Amino acid sequence: MVIALLSLVGTFVALYLTLYKVGVIGQLSCSVGSCEAVNTSQWAVFLGLPVAAWGLGAYIVMLCLALAGIHPALEESRTISWALVAISGWSLLFSLWLTYLELFVIHAICMYCVISAIIVAFLFIASLVDLRTREAGGGRREAGDEEPGTRDNEVETAGII
Amino acid sequence: MGKQRVETGSGRRANVVKRQRRASSMRGFYLALSAVVVAGGAFLIWQYMKPKEGARVTDATGPLAAEGYLLGNANAPVQILEFADFECPACSNFSTITEPDVRKRIVEAGLASFRFFDFPLPQHRHTMKASNSAACANDQGKFWEMHDRIFSGQNDWAASRNPKGIFEDYAKEIGLDVGKWEECYEDGRHQTRIEANRAEGERRGVSSTPSFVIGRRLVPGSLPYDVIKAYVDSATAEVSAKTGGNLDDSAKVRIDPKSAVADSTSTP
């Protein structure tokens, strides 16, 4: 649940920056930093697409995975957890690289980019915790154990996702 | 096997309690999810609507204190004034996607003239240099060529430490006398003119870029062609009604001779 909520917040942040980048929104509301200096820089485009659009895609994929992971039929799926760890880990590395560019190359900070980087960091941590919980809970369930403690694990797992 | 184990009464009760806990936490989750959707959606809608809510009647026929850069016939029945910042993505979007249509189907067709006014925003660090580069190109009659090149290359120069080299390449590309252009660029002689253009926008209530004054209406936002055409048609009808069908004497933009800053007519 935590991952789904964080992904949804990130989706809106990335959508806002994407809409700005494609010219739908006139000016960014940016009370801290220089959002427009960052978002009009050459590093705001990656492989022909706005960086914000890549972020939007990643958040949407993580949101879908997290929502799928809550479904009872997929509650035990460790594939979903691994996918979340992989995507959020890659996104975190990408965000760190972007933050480096902001600080040392562009010399301007975009508060929405910082917010997104923080969300991604929490997503990565939550994904790791979720994976660990599933690994521990799944191990017991594989043995066919339906002791009360197992259901507790399922509730906890759903809570993180 | 564990699955065949008979549950005790207390085990069943424990499972029921846990299912209730789970249902309750799912309700909270869906509520939180809905709250984020509503808050995020409202924020985006507010941001999208913000520039457009300002479409209002303005005194567009009053004398211009600055002339901007004219495209088309100064005596066209309707005047379109664009207030834009060279470093703003929405302005670049308009310039590269919509403006070619506006030039061909409205300006060249004689329905309206088009004037560009610099409206450099303080948060953009190179925008004044871009305006300066375009003003210097105007000295050699190639404002619009430089205007188009600056907007199409926005991603390249906006991120550079010093965009002068890139602007110089543009000057070569469009066939300017680079020596003269550079002298003008370094000189910063058009600073007053650029600031006069911005002041003209402030006087008319412009608060975001791009913003357009079409006829008597101030319309903020990167407008699509159809919307601009609709405003031009509406302004033409207003002018026609006022002058009894004589469009030639209609909405000519008057230049305040005391305050106008340099003449600036050039062709695209």
Image: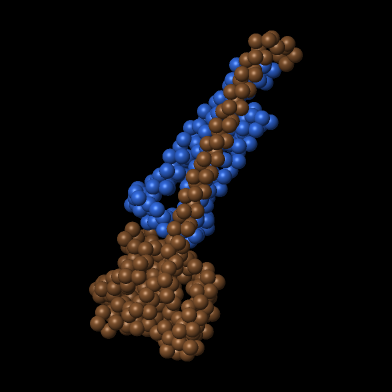
Chain colours: A blue, B brown
Q: Could you tell me which quadrant the C terminus of chain B lies in?
A: bottom left
x 72%, y 12%: residue:
B5
Residue B53: percent from left, percent from top:
45, 61
User: Residue B199 versus residue B146: which sits nearer the camera?
Assistant: B199
Residue A124: percent from left, percent from top:
49, 35
Q: Quadrant of residue B18?
A: top right
x 46%, y 62%: residue:
B52
Residue A74: percent from left, percent from top:
66, 31
Residue B34: percent from left, percent from top:
55, 40
Q: Quadrant of residue A69?
A: top right
- Answer left or right for B221 relative to B255: right
Q: Is residue A41 above or below residue B229?
A: above
User: Residue A49 versus residue B220: which sits nearer the camera?
Assistant: B220
Residue B97 seen by the camera: no
Q: Is residue A75 above or below residue A15?
A: above
Total numbered badges shown on the rendered structure: 0
Q: Could you tell me which quadrant the N terminus of chain B lies in?
A: top right
Residue B31 seen by the camera: yes
x 32%, y 83%: residue:
B255
- Answer left or right for B212 relative to B125: right
x 39%, y 63%: residue:
B208
- Answer left or right for B268 relative to A3: left
User: Residue B177 versus residue A9: which sits nearer the camera?
Assistant: A9
